[in-house]
Image (cartoon, rainbow, N blue to C red):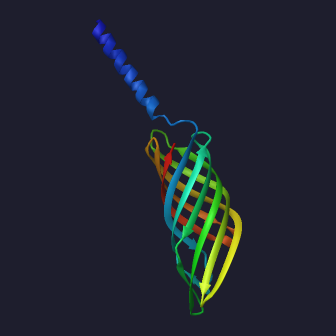
Amino acid sequence: MNTLQKSLLALASASLLSVSAHAAAPATQGYLGLKGGLVMLDDDSTVDIDDAAALGVYGGYNFNPNVAIEAEYVASEDADISAYGIKGEYNVEFFGMYGVYRHYFPNSPVYGKGKLGFVRAKTEASVMGFKESDTDTEIAGGLGLGFAATPNIDIEGEFSLMGGDADGQMLSIGAAYKF
């Protein structure tokens, strides 16, 4: 093997190593994102509650590639509510804090996400000129799938549940920037 071939082999090997090092995600990093979706409050047989479109922001810190802490704030638009033929509107906003676990599938940019924590939900309703507001703190959790579009951008779809008096769900899609 001559000197030129040895040099090319060394250069090719170094190039491959640098590409894999560049693609590796840092062990710890923060992230910020935006999400949108539907808030679906549970209704009973006497109350009809429409789903409400919602927008939110979220952010967190990855302690390692799998474990993170995450906070989110979501607010919905006004949506219709009716009971016994009387119509009104409601909206909801909530702030949540979660512990997050991500499982990265081997040789794939796809990962599963699970989160568990607490949410403080404020629901406001307006019926025939009367306004009512209720705030509750309850346990909440969610499951989702994510896609690492680039080393710094993730896209996530998620289904979240809120328990107790803030009983409801949220189906959302979001994008986060890791820094």
Is the residue 61 above or below the residue 120 in the image? above
- Compared across the picture, whether 165 is left or right of 4 comes to right
Residue at figure coordinates x 53%, y 78% from the top left:
79
Residue at figure coordinates x 38%, y 20% from the top left:
13
From the viewer's side, name the closer residue of 9 and 177: 177
Is the residue 154 above or below the residue 75 in the image? above
On the image, the x and y values in percent for residue 42 come to 61, 75
Residue 126 placement: quadrant: bottom right
Residue 139 placement: quadrant: bottom right
Residue 116 visible, this angle: yes
From the viewer's side, name the closer residue of 124 and 1: 124
On the image, the x and y values in percent for residue 84 come to 60, 92
Q: Quadrant of the N terminus?
A: top left
Residue at figure coordinates x 66%, y 71% from the top left:
166
Residue at figure coordinates x 57%, y 44% from the top left:
30
Is the residue 166 above or below the residue 80 in the image? above
On the image, the x and y values in percent for residue 153 come to 45, 47
Q: How many marks?
A: 0
Residue 1 visible, this angle: no
- Compared across the picture, whether 76 is left or right of 17 comes to right
For the view shown, which residue lies furthest in the bottom direction?
85
For the view shown, which residue lies furthest in the top direction?
2
